[in-house]
Amino acid sequence: MLTLSRTVYISEARTTLSPEAVTALAAKSAAKNRLIAVSGLLLHSQGNFMQCLEGEPRAVELIYHAISEDTRHHRIVRLVDEPTSARLFPNWSMGVLNLDSESFRLDRQCLLDIIAGARGIGARARPATVIQLLREFRSQLPAPAHTPVHPLALRQA
Ligand SMILES: Cc1cc2nc3c(=O)[nH]c(=O)nc-3n(C[C@H](O)[C@H](O)[C@H](O)COP(=O)(O)O)c2cc1C
């Protein structure tokens, strides 16, 4: 049953946010997301964000609405908005990866290509391509420091 919802968007920071500031933002976000069983991943590189949010549809919409009104970033483009039966990131209230390290060189280029396409300066990526990239990042996340967001979330897509 497709009772969950998945949203992926890209955005740009309005002012430079240090990696530490993004980590702090993600920690605060994770605490809020956990309360309503939303999980996901926040990728960032050179002021670009890509975030995946998964959970009960109303919960995802609530968080996405708050995020879209946040003045710390702008040029938000929603790339994926789909129903799903299983989460990609059940163990992460909000995982975070800084792609500006050498180990992410290839994946970062994929992300930048998707962002360019969404901004109309390249081929626009299909949602399936975006999801595939997220799956690749999933395998690179360190072990989660906490228990899964929700017992029902345990089944991984
Ligand atoms: C790139 C980015 C990602 C964010 N992700 C989340 C998130 O996953 N969950 C969340 O609650 N807030 C997130 N926020 C923060 C929200 O935009 C907003 O500041 C927050 O929900 C307000 O919470 P408060 O009213 O409790 O201060 C994010 C902000 C930015 C700039």
Image: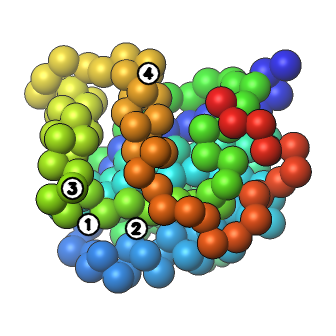
Give the amino acid at mark 2: Thr
Q: Earlier in the sequence, mark 2 or mark 1?
A: 1
The amino acid beneath tag 3 is Ser
Report how far apart the C-alphas of labels 3 and 2 lie in the structure. Answer: 31 Å
| Colour pattern of the rendering | rainbow
Give the residue at mark 2.
Answer: 71
Sequence-wise first label, 4 or 2: 2
Label 4 is placed on what type of residue? Pro
Image spot of residue 30 (x, y percent): 63, 68
Q: Nearer the viewer, mark 3 or mark 2?
A: 3
Quarter of the image holding residue 153?
top right
User: Label 4: few (<14), some or many (≥20) within 10 Å?
Assistant: some
Mark nearest the camera among 3 and 1 is 3
155 relative to 89, above or below: above
CA gap, disc 4 and disc 1? 26 Å
Give the Cα distance between marks 4 and 3: 25 Å
Residue type beneath disc 1: Arg
Residue at the location (40% across, 67% down)? 71
Image quarter for residue 110?
Answer: top left
Q: Which residue is mark 3?
A: 103
| Residue under the image location 65 percent in, 60 percent down | 93
Can you identify the residue that label 4 sits on?
A: 127
